[in-house]
Image (tube, grey):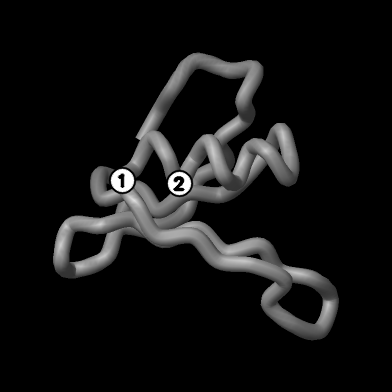
């Protein structure tokens, strides 16, 4: 998710708690998330919602 200060935050969530967090730029945050799963959800300013980001698909935001 893009934060108000322009940084990006990635969160790894388990069934009952947050397992890890990362804050950095967009690319590094997505890379951190993809180290945990090939598929992750990212916030899209264009859509005003989260969208699926699959590491095997073309980059979209």
Furthest toward the right, the residue is 15
- Would residue 38 be found to the left or right of residue 29 on screen? right
Residue 41's x, y, as percent? Answer: 56, 49
User: On the image, numbered disc 1 is attached to which residue?
Assistant: 25
Marks 1 and 2: in contact by CB < 8 Å? yes
* Crowd rating for badge 2 (residues with CA inside 10 Å; few <14, some 14–19, many 20+): many
Quadrant the N terminus occupies: bottom left
* Crowd rating for badge 1 (residues with CA inside 10 Å; few <14, some 14–19, many 20+): some
Residue 26's x, y, as percent? Answer: 34, 42
Which one is nearer the viewer's eye here, 3 or 32?
A: 32
Q: Is residue 57 above or below residue 60?
A: above
Q: Is label 2 in a helix, a strand or a loop?
A: helix
Residue drawn where x is 18% and y is 68% of the image: 4
Q: Is residue 53 above or below residue 4?
A: above
- Would residue 27 be found to the left or right of residue 17 on screen? left
Residue drawn where x is 74% and y is 82% of the image: 17
User: On the image, numbered disc 2 is attached to which residue?
Assistant: 29
Quadrant the C terminus occupies: top left
Residue 50's x, y, as percent? Answer: 47, 54
């Amino acid at each position: 998710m893009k934060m108000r200060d322009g940084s990006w935050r990635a969160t790894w969530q388990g069934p009952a708690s947050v397992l890890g967090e990362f804050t950095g730029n967009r690319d590094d945050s997505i890379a951190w998330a993809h180290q945990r799963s090939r598929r992750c959800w990212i916030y899209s300013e264009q859509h005003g919602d989260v969208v699926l980001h699959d590491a095997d698909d073309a980059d979209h935001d």
